[in-house]
Amino acid sequence: MKFVKYLAWTIVALFVLIPSTLAVLVMTSTGSQFIIERSAQLADIDLEFDSLSGNLVGQLTLKNLKVAKSPWQASVESLTLEWQPSQLLDQALVFKKIETRSLLFEIATADNNSTSSEAITLPQLKLPITLMVNDFSAINSNLVLDNNRQQLPDIDGRLDWRGTKLNMKQLHLDYQQISTFIAGSITTRNDYPINLELRWQLSDPIDKSAIEGITGNTHVRGSIANIDAVTTFTVPPQTEQHTIHLQVKDTLSNSRSWLAEVAINQLSTSPLIPIILANDSPWYSWLNSSSLTLDATIDNQQVAIEEFLLSNIGANKGYVAFDGVLNNYLAFNESLSKVSLRGALNSSKLSLPHEAIGLQLDINELTGNVEGSLESFSHNLDINATYDNKLPAEVKFSGNGSASHFTVEHAQINSDAITADITSTVDWSSELAVSASIHSFSAQLEQLKELADYELRAQGNVIYKEQRLAAENLLIRWGENSINLNGAMTESSELNLSLDVPDLSTLSNNEYFSGDVKANLAITGTIDERIDIQVKDLVLNHPDFGNWTNTDQGLISVPVATPLATSVDSLCLTANTQRAPANLCFDTTANNSIQTTQITGQNLPLALLNRFRESDVAERIWGLANLNSSISYDTSTWSLVETEGALRSERTILFALDEEISTRFNYWQLDWQGNLDKLETSITAELEEDKGLVIGDLVASNIADGADLSGDIIIELRDLTVLQWALPDLRYENAHALAQINISGSTQAPSVTGSIELAAQEIGFAQSGLLLTNVRIAAFDTAEVDNGITLDGQAQSGQGWISIAGLLEPLKPELTLTIQGEEFRAIQIPTATVDISPNIKITLLNERIDVTGEVDIPYVRIDQPEIADMGVTTSTDVEVYQNGEPLRAQEAGLYPIYADVRVTLGDDVKVKGFGFEGDLAGSLRLTETPKRALTASGNISVNKGFYELYGQRLEIERGSFIYNGGPIDNPGLDLRVERSSENMLATEDVRVGAQVSGTLQEPDFRLYSTPAMPDSEVLSYLILGRGSGTATAGNENLQLQALILLGSKGTDFIGESLQDTFGFDEFGIDSTMNPNDTSFYIGKYLSPKLYVKYGVGLFEDTNTFLVRYLLSEKLIIETTASSEAQGGDIFYTIEK
């Protein structure tokens, strides 16, 4: 019975208890954890994790898992597994999901330097069951190999492994800027056959380029031992396809080989240009339309460029082509002689950008070759080009080179602008060394306007080696100017530089460049550290600034890395003036990184400031000033530490060249002290005889962040002559000015408060003749408006007065100004006197100026105005130059002006000039906008007047200038002039005159008479005062000339039409003292020296033909043939 009992318990244990126990273990989290930990112990693997959720039957998730077994270890933030155990019955291991987050796998190799000569043998893998992963995901994975960390691509996809075939159905890899989809299979037997298709996209592949992405497909086939990959790709938005074909053979052996074939098909270079050029570079637009074509083959023996073509370059669609071969390049470290190279370069139709090189240069043909080995090769380059208006130029280079040096044995340039013969060598075997021998060099500096008339010439030797510069008899000349370099620049030896410029004006058209300069300098140091320049001799002679020479051999030291920290030691200049010699000295001391430069000057002539005044301004300054200043700065950060100084003068005079008036200062002084945190300045000036005083101070704080301002200025003047420096036209009598100004705020938002008052018995302006009396002008704070200034002023002139009142807000800016007056004398000069009664309002608001109101002109006297004021303006194609620089039209004002003003002439307006004398009256409305010229509406009438024509006084019976809203310089005309009866013969009872209509620019004349008579008879009465029957021969001709003048508008119109149609050079009516000889003629220059003219008589049946030929500048032959006579003349001109 016991046996049966034990057997029963055994059956229960085998079929009930054990399965139940196993079920508990795998179907619970605790049991699953127990199985995982025991399995790790049995496998001798270190395993840790923070938490476990799920079970081994369904989904299992481990947090912060760490697994290690020498020589590797792995950690993962999260690992999730979900599988289907029931599939094991079908001999399949199926994972529904495998997911890792933040996987870090670390492994150390046994010997990084070990190499094996044995071929790699691939294991033959065949799974006994099918492995399927329906969802595999690995995010943020990293591999650490021998302490080198490498980020792995993010993976998402599906795969299955059946026997020896691994199928990747849809595998997605994301790595930095590339996204790839992989589909295909790998067979895990023999040499692992491969058949994979990759679709990929690369985003922002190249920094600074305009390429947004590259898309492509790669087909990988073959096996692990022999890989064949073909890639095709495009660069959007272009549609051209490019190909890379890569073949790698015997990868598992030590005799592996590879071959890459690259085919780029007309790839636009436009997206690549920003890598090396800025958008505003002229080279950018030059290359912007070019494209690249490349066919190249690379293997482990050679690099062969079958075609490199850069086409469509510049305006002429030029090209650059290259082909060549580099053989046995892997032997570079063994023997340079084994590495051979051959290349050919050619180019054509390259029109280089004018903006970049300063001239028009076209490379018609360029050829070059290189052949040899890296131990020794030969090279040559020939360029055939044209420049500036198709002038020819040839450049030829030839020489040899190696992997450590490059020599140009002959560099020849032949052109009208440059000729050169140079030999040079660049060697980099140890340190960079450059040497050049200039056998001959000459160039025309046409691109530099100031030096266009000079030839630059150079000859000598120059060497750069070991950060040092040396020259041997290097002479550079242009015109009479020269620079000579001789010696070697080291820390102990000198490179001597001699400069001689006899005429500084040849270097620049700037008016301040004049005089001559000579200098002898000794240069020591090294180019990579510090360059010291000793000023041995310096002589500068300037017609305005004086003659300056150095008194000591000063030293200028330039740190190459920080050139702004240049220091000057004992450099003093002295001006040899007639009265008191002027001195200006610079001296620098250093304390660690703090450098202090002291600048001192004695007897500095203030007359140098006159050089900056316009030549037609009479006001000048004279005096001497002393300067004592210093500036300290940190050379490591180039920040200001402290500055202080004083500029003082005890002898300063402001005077006018054309008058015996002047302003003398007892003294004036400007002081400053501080740094970028706080800078304090002050000024004090005192006029002689207690005529004025200026005291001011200003403090600027936090200058680097936008200075905060605080200061005051007090001014008291009883001598306004000082203002003539800014207002040269000003004259005054018994004037007094007071000002108290407070400055606050910041440089971005300053605030100016206080008051200014000016009072004078008389103030005159010489140019306009304006004389103001009892002048009162004031500007002061406006309490109710922040930062507002109230303007108020009154003055008298003539028998009238004027006043201004308004409000100015300069920080907005806004302005409201009212100008009123009555019979105010605005102009009083010998030829014109004008009184006005203005009532004008001027406003500045929203960045525009509006002028409105009325101006009455009660009194005007104009007597023969200046003829210069009536001159003809230049045409649009005329450009006026002064001192070699074009004079530009005055720029428009800061704000646009909108004007609407009514101008009314009073009852006492009289004008006399140019044969006219009369009284004017009327009213005009003047309007102006920024986009429209000044226009007028209204009329100006002649109440009473006379006009003198051909010595005859004609009465203006009616006269009006009519403005209908058109330009003010072209009014309509309505004039009627009539000969006065007292100027007619007593026996004549007639009235004659002329009616003028049309516009001022195109007038129309018509004669009238009572009783009616022909125009010729009317002209006789109008011009001569009697009928034609009593006219003399001379008077008949005068009458005819008047008729021609009267009809000139019609002949001009016909002549312009004939000239436009037939190309005549001359057309008109010709007359002599005999009226019967009047003729109509046309003329034409058949060549610059040959002129023909044909005329037809108007009153007689005659034809005239004239031929004139210019034999020389002084000798002319002329022949004339007509129906009446023939003749010839020889004219010889003598200039006295």
Image (cartoon, grey):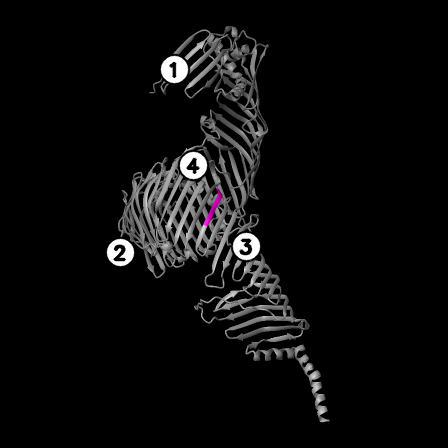
Which amino acid, mark 3?
Val
Helix, strand or loop under label 2: loop
Report the Cα–Cα distance between label 4 and label 1: 58 Å
Relative image position of residue 251 (x, y in whole percent)? 49, 62
Rendered image quadrant of residue 723: top left
* Quadrant showing the N terminus: bottom right
Relative image position of residue 788 (x, y in whole percent)? 53, 48
Q: Is residue 417 visible?
A: yes
Helix, strand or loop under label 3: strand
Helix, strand or loop under label 1: strand
Which residue sits at x=52%, y=60%? Answer: 226
Q: Does the magenta run of residues contain 1004?
A: no
Helix, strand or loop under label 4: loop
Q: Which residue is mark 3?
A: 230
- Rate crowding at label 1 as few (under 14), some (14 to 19) or many (20 or more) other CA atoms within 10 Å: some
Identify the magenta region: 305-313
- Mark sitting earlier along the chain (2/3): 3
Q: Nearer the viewer, mark 4 or mark 1?
A: 1
1109 lies left or right of 838: left
Which amino acid, mark 2?
Ser
Q: Which residue is mark 4?
A: 729
Q: Which residue is mark 1?
A: 1117
Report the Cα–Cα distance between label 3 and label 1: 88 Å
